[in-house]
Image: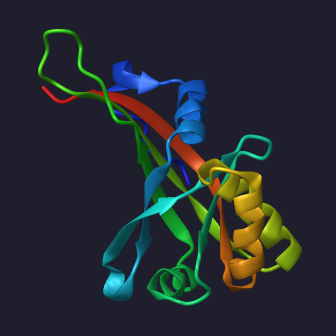
Amino acid sequence: MEFRKMRRSAQQLSNEKCIEILKREPRGVLAVIGDEDYPYALPLDFVYEEENGKIYFHCAKVGYKLDALRNNNKVSFCVYDEGFRKEGDWALNIKSIIIFGKIKFIEDQEETIERVRKLALKYYPTAEAVEEEIVKAGSRVQMLELTIEHMTGKLVNES
């Protein structure tokens, strides 16, 4: 499939800037195709692995999101920063990224734990706390892997 080019290309962020945002920001919004083809979008924690260019999410092993992904693994994922205001300006400037790709369920338990560990290290205060959580809940985690097929970033001025 050929994805559309960004209409306002003067505002387009470089691939490097997009990756910086993916590595830094704590949450994004994942959109799936739900029941009756209605979109279903939900905020999720994630980790971007620069080594393979993929994004990982964790969740329970059952639920609406997983049912939707089993029916159609194509997704959109949006990440945006807190924004900034230029001195003396009321308008917020926000950098956002839109990703299109496909989700794969990680079924291997060793790989699941490895990915959980990387994701948790982004959020937990210590490696010890991560290991405690893995012992407590690691067996109940479903990891999802997003392969990026298309990514664009944009600087938006809300004025």
| Number of dots carrying numbers | 0
Q: Residue at x 41, y 75 (%)?
A: 33
In this rendering, the answer to whether 58 lies above or below 129 is: below
Q: Position of residue 87 (x, y in %)?
A: 20, 9
Is residue 120 shown left or right of residue 44? right
Look at the image and tell me in which quarter the C terminus lies.
top left
Q: In this orientation, which residue lies closer to the viewer: 150 or 124?
A: 124
Q: Residue at x 56, y 54 (%)?
A: 1
Q: Position of residue 62 (x, y in %)?
A: 56, 90
Q: Position of residue 9 (x, y in %)?
A: 38, 24
Single out the residue that lies furthest toward the top: 87
Q: Residue at x 67, y 57 (%)?
A: 119
Q: In this orientation, which residue lies closer to the viewer: 118 or 129?
A: 129
Single out the residue that lies furthest toward the right: 110
Is residue 139 shown left or right of residue 45? right
What colouring method underlies this structural image?
A: rainbow
Q: In this orientation, which residue lies closer to the viewer: 135 or 33?
A: 135
Q: Position of residue 23 (x, y in %)?
A: 60, 39
Q: Residue at x 60, y 34 (%)?
A: 19
In this rendering, the answer to whether 67 lies above or below 50 is: below
Quadrant of res 112: bottom right
Q: In this orientation, which residue lies closer to the viewer: 145 or 120?
A: 120
